[in-house]
Image (spheres, helix red, strand yellow):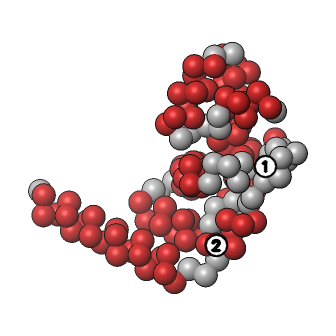
């Protein structure tokens, strides 16, 4: 019941703490993914799982492996977290691809804005700049 949920939450909190404390690569990775204004991810960067995985900081990967068993889902969630944490300095391939594809497929400003609010896409303004 409640006790087992509290134990699980405590365990996850301790693991996250230790992952971030002992990971020396997390800040280096986030500085490597910073974008310039002229850079947009290519199709290869969006579709290739290995290429997408390179965008994810090691500390975040270590945490997501614990809670999400599927590698594709780990990468997607990680991209959304990085994009949400650094919305002005990072343009992650997966949220970028989702925003552009939804705009192209449905032409709905509302849909792209809603996915952006939920953290699954880039902003509609960024899609329009592309």
Determine whether 83 is above or below 20 in the image. above
Residue 69 in view of the camera? yes
Quarter of the N terminus within the rendering: bottom left
Answer with mark 1 or mark 2, whichever residue precedes in sequence.
2
Residue 83: percent from left, percent from top: 61, 50
Task: Write down the residue under mark 2.
Answer: 27
- Circle 1 Cα neighbour tier, 10 Å, few/some/many (<14 / 14–19 / ≥20): some
**Residue at (61% x, 81% y) in the render:** 24
**Residue at (13% x, 58% y) in the render:** 2
Determine whether 117 is above or below 104 in the image. below
Corner quadrant of residue 124: top right
Task: Write down the residue under mark 1.
Answer: 45
**Residue at (57% x, 34% y) in the render:** 116
From the viewer's perspective, tell me whether residue 47 is left or right of residue 18. Answer: right
Please give the label number shown on residue 60: none
Determine whether 69 is above or below 19 in the image. above
Residue 85: percent from left, percent from top: 56, 54
How far is mark 1 from mark 2, CA to CA? 21 Å
């Amino acid at each position: 019941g409640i006790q087992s949920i509290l134990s699980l939450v405590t365990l996850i909190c301790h693991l996250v703490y230790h992952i971030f404390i002992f990971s020396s690569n997390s800040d280096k990775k986030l500085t490597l993914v910073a974008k310039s204004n002229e850079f947009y991810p290519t199709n290869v960067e969006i579709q290739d799982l290995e290429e997408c995985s390179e965008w994810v900081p090691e500390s975040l990967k270590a945490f997501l492996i614990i809670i999400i068993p599927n590698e594709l889902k780990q990468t997607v969630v990680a991209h959304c977290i990085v994009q949400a944490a650094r919305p002005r300095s990072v343009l992650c391939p997966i949220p970028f691809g989702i925003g552009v594809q939804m705009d192209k497929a449905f032409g709905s400003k509302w849909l792209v804005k809603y996915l952006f609010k939920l953290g699954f896409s880039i902003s509609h303004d960024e899609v329009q700049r592309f």
